Image (cartoon, helix red, strand yellow):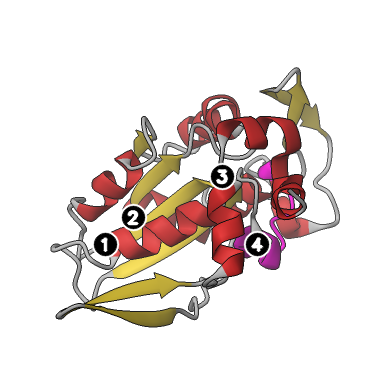
Amino acid sequence: MPGKDGSCGTLYRAVLSDDKFSLEKSSVASVASNPRYVVFQDSAQIARLRSARVHVIVSSHSGAGLATTAYDRILAPLLKIFSIEVAVHSTTSKTSHREYLANLQLFSGKENIFVVLGGDTLIYDFLNATLTNPHFKSSDRLILCPIPCGTGNALAMSLGRTSIPIGISSLFCNKEPKPLPLLEITIHEATNPRIIWAAVVCSWGLHASLVADSDDPEMRRQFGPKRFGVYSEV
């Protein structure tokens, strides 16, 4: 973060040790030549975040379980430094985030920015809960910022957010949002058709069964992202 004259500033570095993040700070005499992750206090993106309604969803048990420490020790301190107010929901069950998103009051006159610290499952749940929210209108502007904290992080990776610190840095940098292509699937169940929204991958049959059956706490703990392959060999 450069100083007011742009010639010097503060370097923030995220360090992971014993499954806990810490945010280290040091002064720098000059700004790095690569401006990709240089943030100015008065930048357009910081002003945008301050004027928007920002929601942070923390998936407490996703992936390696780093979402909570990433929020508490990196994202929350940076939000405070830049004077950005947010509403935070930390998951307390497998469905708490869906209930939160399905009933959330959206703001038509503001951008609704969702910072998601989780994986692709949380992206799926975000789409299907938010788009069925009774307060949602087609004119509402929803912006999604995925931070790769899950077992699978295909959407975040496709955006170049290859680590948690890079994902968090991207939130504060000037980037114009791009439309997210969605897949709408209609499932006919008896007399009531059900609509499912997807953005990363949609599977049915054998692959879907492998994903669902390997979604076990012990499998997650032992094998992490390799659990899908391990279960397929059982």
Residue shown at the point (51%, 50%) measured from the top left: 42
Q: Residues within 10 Å of mark 4 (few under 14, many from 20)?
A: some
Residue where numbered disc 4 is placed: 154
Residue shown at the point (23%, 54%) measured from the top left: 102
Q: Amino acid at mark 3?
A: Asp
Asked if 111 appears above or below 188 in the picture, the reply is above
Q: Amino acid at mark 4?
A: Ala
Which of the two labelled residues, at mark 3 and mark 1, occupies the earlier sequence position?
1
Q: CA distance from mark 4 to mark 2?
A: 26 Å
Residue 172, x across and y down, in percent: 57, 51
Residue shown at the point (64%, 55%) measured from the top left: 153
Which of the two labelled residues, at mark 1 and mark 2, occupies the earlier sequence position?
2
Q: CA distance from mark 1 to mark 4?
A: 28 Å
Q: Residues within 10 Å of mark 2 (few under 14, many from 20)?
A: some
Residue 207, x across and y down, in percent: 61, 66
Q: Residues within 10 Å of mark 1 (few under 14, many from 20)?
A: some
Mark 1 touches mark 2? (CB < 8 Å)? yes
Q: Which mark is residue 215?
A: 3
9 horizontally vs 142: left or right: right
Which stretch did the figure color magenta? 154-165
Q: Secondary structure at mark 1?
A: loop
Which of the two labelled residues, at mark 4 and mark 3, occupies the earlier sequence position?
4
